[in-house]
């Protein structure tokens, strides 16, 4: 949206120098590929071969869970068949067992059941192929350009790969879903006769850890996606083929939280401008930020905030109506944006009846 289209342009600089001690210690990993991002903005805080396409093993199941939660009711019932039996890690399903989709998702994400992955796929879609197609459609929608799925469980297969960056982007998106977030942060659960303990040791080892998923095959090596929240900021970390992944993730999380903080450049509801109302019952309405405008910053960085809005808008005006936008810039590049909304209503002025003169009454 070009600046020239807006009647008003309000600029303010948010200076955040010296707010952090900013320990600039070096950090590295044993991984072939690694990335650390902030969840809401996607800002990359650390990267190492982030776009290399590699085998990913069971962190695949993050996508399996996302597709299931977006395409089916979690209370949907499913009866296990022989087609759901699989090699490798298992939640020990037997043909004839009947479970709800949500219960299968616990088996998928806590104990990495390859049988659970097949059961989820068959519960949600008409066929395994149809489910995998949904996985690839979702990857494309999320801009995961270094990813392709061939199955829902992550067993090594031709045409089954992703990158550290893509998997971090996927996990950041998945964590917006409250059901997903609840499942992956669960330390243990009992499903019928089954006791499922989460394989993700970081839930007890890493401060603020809220999930996400472990993986391993001989060819892929150890793969891990984790997320942690501290002081209102959530970081997501991915490592691929990493023999020391628990320690690497804890070190990367500590690095991220020590060097970055989530800064609210404009809080939701702050009045930034006003707009005249054409043919309205009020002269003008105040314009406010629809949501918090936030971005993770190091101690010596500053944001420039630009609010853009027309000088006037037509009546009627409804509170919450998007009128313009508020953008945050870091070193001249737009990094975050929220709507600028009307904070008060205005009805449309009723047309006045024409004046009646004395001569109109003459007879």
Image (spheres, rainbow, N blue to C red):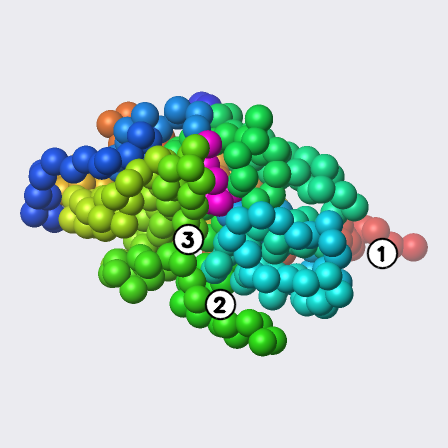
- Point out which mark residue 11 bears: none
Ranked by sequence position, the earlier of labels 1 and 3 is 3
Q: Nearer the viewer, mark 1 or mark 3?
A: 3
Q: For mark 3, what is the residue?
A: 212
Which of 274 and 164 lies nearest the eye of the viewer?
164
Q: Look at the image and tell me whether residue 331 can be seen.
A: yes
- Point out which mark residue 196 bears: 2
Which of 217 and 123 lies nearest the eye of the viewer?
217
Residues rendered magenta in the picture: 55-60
x and y percentages locating residue 321 in the rendered image: 56, 50
x and y percentages locating residue 98 in the rendered image: 72, 68
Local SS, label 2 = strand
Crowd class of label 2 (few under 14; some 14 to 19; many from 20; radius 10 Å): some
Does the magenta run of residues contain 259?
Answer: no
- Marks counted in the figure total 3
Ranked by sequence position, the earlier of labels 1 and 2 is 2
Crowd class of label 1 (few under 14; some 14 to 19; many from 20; radius 10 Å): few
Relative to residue 157, is residue 83 drawn left or right? Answer: right
Disc 1 from disc 3: Cα separation:
82 Å
Disc 1 from disc 2: Cα separation:
90 Å
Relative to residue 202, is residue 100 drawn left or right? Answer: right
Q: Are marks 1 and 2 in contact (CB under 8 Å)?
A: no
Q: For mark 1, what is the residue?
A: 361
Local SS, label 1 = helix
x and y percentages locating residue 189 in the rendered image: 49, 72
Relative to residue 200, is residue 63 drawn left or right? Answer: right
Disc 3 from disc 2: Cα separation:
15 Å
């Amino acid at each position: 949206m070009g600046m020239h289209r807006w009647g008003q342009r309000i600029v303010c600089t948010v200076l955040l120098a010296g707010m952090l001690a900013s320990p600039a210690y070096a950090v590295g990993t044993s991984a072939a590929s690694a990335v650390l991002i902030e969840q809401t903005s996607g800002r990359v805080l650390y990267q190492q071969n982030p776009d290399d396409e590699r085998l990913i093993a069971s962190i695949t199941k993050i996508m399996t869970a996302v597709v299931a939660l977006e395409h089916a009711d979690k209370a949907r019932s499913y009866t296990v068949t022989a087609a759901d039996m699989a090699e490798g890690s298992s939640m020990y399903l037997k043909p004839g067992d009947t479970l709800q989709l949500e219960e299968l998702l616990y088996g998928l994400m806590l104990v990495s059941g390859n049988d659970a992955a097949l059961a989820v796929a068959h519960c949600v879609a008409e066929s395994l192929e149809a489910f995998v197609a949904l996985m690839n459609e979702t990857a494309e929608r999320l801009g995961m350009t270094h990813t392709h799925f061939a199955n829902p469980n992550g067993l090594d297969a031709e045409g089954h790969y992703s990158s550290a960056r893509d998997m971090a982007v996927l996990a950041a998106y998945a964590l917006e879903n409250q059901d997903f977030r609840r499942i992956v942060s669960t330390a243990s659960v009992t499903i019928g006769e089954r006791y499922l303990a989460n394989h993700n040791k970081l839930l007890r080892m890493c401060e603020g850890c809220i999930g996400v998923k472990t993986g391993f095959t001989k060819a892929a090596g150890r793969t891990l996606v984790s997320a942690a929240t501290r002081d209102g900021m959530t970081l997501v970390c991915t490592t691929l083929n990493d023999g020391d992944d628990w320690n690497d993730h804890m070190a990367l999380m500590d690095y991220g939280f020590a060097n970055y903080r989530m800064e609210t450049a404009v809080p939701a509801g702050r009045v930034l401008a006003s707009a005249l109302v054409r043919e309205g019952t009020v002269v003008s309405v105040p314009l406010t930020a629809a949501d918090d405008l936030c971005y993770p910053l190091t101690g010596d960085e500053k944001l420039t905030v630009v609010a853009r809005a027309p000088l006037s808008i037509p009546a009627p005006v409804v509170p919450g109506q998007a009128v313009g936008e508020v953008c945050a810039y870091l070193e001249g590049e737009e990094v975050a944006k929220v709507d600028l909304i009307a904070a008060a209503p205005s009805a449309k002025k009723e047309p006045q009846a024409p004046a009646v003169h004395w001569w109109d009454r003459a007879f």
